[in-house]
Image: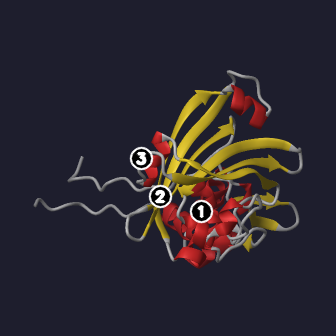
Amino acid sequence: MSPQIQRPDPPYVQVVNHIRSQIQSGALKDGDTIPSARQISRDWEISLATATKVLASLRSEGLVKALPGIGTVVTVFGEQYTSPRDRFQAIRRTGRIYPPNEAAQIKECELVSAPEQVADALGLELGMNAIRRRRVTMNIETHTPVSASTSWFDGALAEVAPKLLVAERLVQGTPGYIEEQAGRIAVSGRDQQCADVATEQDATDLGVPVGSPVLRGRNWLYDQEGGVIEYGEYVTVSGRWSTYDYKLAEEQGAQ
């Protein structure tokens, strides 16, 4: 293999990554004050201009905001929890599924014959029972819906996790409840999203005109043995952000 040139991240990126990881892990919580640009400059031995760039980058991601007379504070709940992945990560780092200004209303919980798409996703034979939980998430400040989703589970879980069939929110989230009741631990997931237009059902759930733009998605949540714990389909109104961090492959040789 040819030798590779190592290019470490620029100093400001390293500091941003450090503070971001503290926020994502819950070490820095919503409302916590983070160091000022001058303090960052001293702690990390970087220029004031570079430290200022750090705060600007964190603000641009919606992770912090400047409050007059207070300083720069964490605004983790300023993020838009658009997808199941967002909510799953949120509960792990903050203990909460939704931001304080949002709450889910469980509309339906029932045991039904699994449709073909659902049976395929959950690894069931066509016609076997599946648990269906449908919810609408509301902005409690404006009293307007922001998303609607349907989660599907193997019907066999009804015996060991009966609350899946109760139209009430599960404080620990469905993955946490299933882990407690059935020992199935959610270890990975997969989300797919696409731009779409609102159907009649979407219009009813979200209070938008039929044909208006929406973001549609579906998700799979896998346990420690690779089985699908949950298959879901969701739709959200336009204008909501979802955050995904990633690292590109290292460059091969000098350019």
- The residue lying at 38 percent from left, 69 percent from top is 225
Q: Is 196 above or below relative to 3?
A: above
Of the pair 231 and 218, the residue shown nearer to us: 231
Amino acid of disc 1: Phe
Marks 1 and 2 in Cβ contact (< 8 Å): yes
Image side of residue 78 versus residue 43, left or right: right
Q: Quadrant of residue 52?
A: bottom right
Q: Earlier in the sequence, mark 1 or mark 3?
A: 1
**Which numbered dot is residue 184?**
none
Q: Is 172 above or below relative to 122?
A: below
- Label 1 sits on a secondary structure element that is helix
Q: Earlier in the sequence, mark 3 or mark 2?
A: 3
- Label 2 sits on a secondary structure element that is strand
Count how many numbered circles sit on residues in the image: 3
Image side of residue 104 versus residue 224, left or right: right
**Which numbered dot is residue 189?**
2
Of the pair 7 and 228, the residue shown nearer to us: 228
**Which numbered dot is residue 120?**
3
Q: Earlier in the sequence, mark 1 or mark 2?
A: 1
**Which numbered dot is residue 88?**
1
Amino acid of disc 3: Asp
Coloured how?
secondary structure
The residue furthest left is 1
Amino acid of disc 2: Gly
